[in-house]
Amino acid sequence: MTTDAPIKPHPSPKQYVQIAVILAVLTGVEVGLYYIEQAGVSSRIVYPTLIVLAALKFVIVVAFYMHVRYEKSLIARFFTVGFVGALMLYTVVLGTFGVLAALGG
Amino acid sequence: MASTTAPASTIFRRPKQTSGWMSWLTTVDHKKIGIMYGYSAFFFFILGGLEALILRLQLAGPNGTVLDANEYNAMFTMHGTTMIFLFVMPVGAAFFNYMMPLMIGARDVAFPRMNALSFWIFIFGGIFLYSSFLFGTTGPPAGGNLPGGATDASWLGSTINGGWFMYQPNAGPRFSTGTVLDFGAIGLQILGLASLISAVNFIATIFNMRAKGMKLLRMPVFVWMTLVVAFLLLFSLPIIAVALFMVTFDRQLGTLFFDTFQGGDAILWQHLFWLFGHPEVYILILPAMGIVSETLPVFSRKPLFGYPAVVFAGAAIGFLGFGVWAHHMFASGITPVAQAAFGLATMTIAVPTGIKIFNWMGTMWMGKIKFTTPMLFSLGFVALFVIGGLSGVTHSIVPADWQQTDTYYIVAHFHYVLFGGAIFGIFAGLYYWFPKLTGRMLSERLGKLHFWLMFVGMNLTFGPMHWLGLQGMVRRTWKYPEEYNFGTWNMVVTVGAYTIALSILVFMINWVRSKRRGAESGMDPWDARTIEWSIPNPTPEWNFGVNPEVQALDDWWHRKYDEDDEGRPVRKAEADATIAQFHDQGVNPPAPIHLPSPSYFPFLAGSAFLAIGYGVIYHTKGWGLPLLAFGVILLLSSMIGWSLEPIEEEHEEVHA
Amino acid sequence: MSDIAHDEHLHESTGIETRKLAMWIFLSSEFMFFGALISNYLLFKGRVGYPEPYPSEMFDIPFTSVSSFVLLMSSLTMVLADHAIHRDDQRATRTWIVATALLGMVFLSGQAFEFTEFVLHDPPMKISTNPAASAFFTLTGFHGMHVLIGVIMLLTLAGTSFRKGRLSTATGLNLESVALYWHFVDIIWIVIFTVVYLIK
């Protein structure tokens, strides 16, 4: 593959494994939080944390395993347009149904 | 760089034919695929037109007796579905396929076999949809005393009948018990897949296959509009795919998404449908906008006025097109806040559209206009599209829209933008680029007759619909009583519709005659601006004998013309020599050229969808599941065979 | 699904390999697809009063956590395969491809088990029990279908590798694109796991 020489060198296998460990730990924390909420801690604290953790995992996989961090910015733009576009559209749709208000309250 | 992999050892011997029907079946040449798209789309145009003519017979006078209510439902549904999914979209794909690679200076699209796959999926999807005439059944509503359609025994009435937007739960399993709406949902799903594949292909092509020097802002506007349309398809088709899957599951597996008796949601369907449906209308109109942005400068002998603004406005229309879907739902009970927001958003679309119209006028202003047939159609496009656009703005005012919803005023509006707009633009493109296909010109005499008949017919047909709508004539009504006094205008509409039919007949005669006996066009008959005219006509198999290098927007024009002190074009002394030189290298490529080899797999993979579709509909019958399994296996094995087959056989060099 | 009209002057105007670019374009549209399915579930899960049980009462969180973990780790093996092919290490490539496919199959078996449990439960939760169940099965079913297609692509790659002795990055099905697809399916599951399973 000479045509797509990365701008920055990709991580080494060792680093990939380290990233996987981080992902595994985050998943463990998520499951732990689920039980903490079951035990009676307010979902107002737990749910936002869960969403932040999922977003973190999402970003780590995209940036490192999908190499977006190491690619031309065009790819990041495709990705952002698709993701942000979908997020905005469906937020509006669910908003018109009043679902978001139900989640927030 | 010849392919270095081992010779193909796939299931079949690689097809080699370069002529005859087998060459069309296995071709991966974007030009042949474009031509096939064009002819099949035109075939469906005729079918959709005949359906419209039957509708107009029924409505010509009060209390029509040509059709019964069921047949009328089936006819208007098939008319709309055909014109949108089987005519305007594929004819757009035909132009994209044939012209876009030529306009960016490429040998082919990025993925030639995938391109063929798109076409075959489209064809089999169309066959599938139309096979509902043969196999479809309609039935009374399930579960007792529900209103709804009765069983219709006639073949005309037993085809897809839920309206092109298949509102739920009317088109769900409870109110439409036959199989016709399964044909509708699955057929559209198959057609959508075809468009999605070609969207990915076109975007990759435009991003990656441009000739040297073809920067994004040197691309012809038509290519820009191809790109915008491809993005609209890319982001809107997945939404309708989900919606159609939900309908199919409701009907086949007993899911409850839209069954309002058991917790389903009818409004959800409207959201999902129009999230797709509104971008879809820009998918239909933007190719035509791209075409007239090419023809107007050529026949005004001036560069396009404000090229970056036209490009930007096209992209803005695409972007805003995703934010206005709920204006189709003003009468569905969405909240006042949503109504106000979507009303405002809808009005803003008029801004980029206005920019485009202003720029087209600016292009013609002070130009030396040549009123050729393609120019007449382009002018027709601008005029009629403005009318349709203005009536569109009236829908964005919510209280007015409540009055207009489901009346003929709406029908008038979207026929002005889609017939007056899209179809006039398409004909402008056909007259303009016909020499590229054939090396001959379409007759100007018949062409002008065609234009005037169509222009008059179009206004007779769709103009009076405005008044009928405002008088309260309801859309999708199969007959009206005499005392409503709708009869006179309806008769005018019917006469107009048959005038359009006559004009299409003139066009067909022109096409067939000119293909054989039309005047030879030479290489650059219109003294054009873009690089697709820098190669011989008809286009050689290899497109460009020498890979082009582009130095400017309207590169071909600048090779022929200089500007004098006042900005007027002055033909260069060496212009004729330049044309001769390009012609020569186009006919006799100096170096051998490798072209992708034909393949059986796109056709086979496409045909698998026919088996899959019938398999799903008839899965409760003994032979349904085996058929489904057969389709899936055929699809998988074609894809695997495909991935093992090298793109290009060795010794495939084309020597002129 | 990878072929390129190439000729002696092939160049990529953007500098991104065309098959990879196409995969990214396709994946950006997949957001719309899964976005619609997830929205369906969010819309219907709160509409109570229809026949029980609802999906949220049925989840077996320890079980699903394990299968989520398996899918997450398959992303690691996938990226290692991708890394190996770039260094032309054919043995390692083959090993990691097969490992990824196996992990994918473990995930799919887990999903099959979960679905079976739900359907055999008393009272059963079937796809036609209530709209929330319809949305749940449709969402996770389509995700599973994506995993299945990924497994088939991986097995095709492995088969090619055994048959020809080596995988090439230059022609045919492209490992890098398959890897992108695989990671995408994984990140969708990251979202589903949190939004559907963990948040009630």
Image: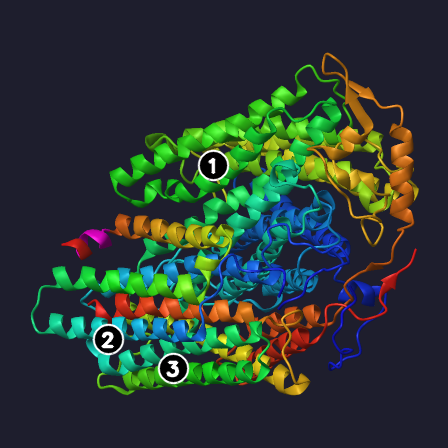
What residue sits 92% from the left and 50% below the top?
B588
Q: Is residue C60 visible?
A: no
Let me know if residue C91 is in the magenta part: no
Q: Which residue is at the front of the view, B412 or B248?
A: B248
- Camera-near label (2 vs 3) is 2
The residue wearing badge 3 is C107
The amino acid marked with disc number 1 is Ile
Residue placed most toward the observer, B198 or B532: B532
Chain label for disc 3: C
User: What is the spatial separation of the Cα atoms under label 3 and label 1, in whole angstroms?
Assistant: 51 Å
Question: Label 2, on which residue?
Answer: A28
Q: Which residues are magenta?
A: A98-102
Amino acid, disc 3: Phe
For the residue carrying disc 1, how many other residues have a C-alpha within 10 Å: few (<14), some (14-19), or many (20+)? many
Residue nearest the viewer, comparing B406 with C89: C89
User: Which is the main secondary structure of the residues drawn in magenta?
Assistant: helix
Chain for numbered disc 2: A
The residue depicted at 9 percent of the width and 64 percent of the height is A42
Query: Could you say whether the residue bearing mark 3 is in a helix, strand or loop?
Result: helix
What amino acid type is highlighted by mark number 2?
Gly
Q: Position of residue B271 (x, y in %)?
A: 37, 51
The quarter holding residue B591 reads: bottom right
Q: Position of residue C3 (x, y in %)?
A: 67, 65
Give the label on residue B398, or none.
Answer: none
Mark 2 crowdedness (10 Å alpha carbons): few <14, some 14-19, many ≥20: some
Disc number placed over residue B410 in the picture, else none = 1
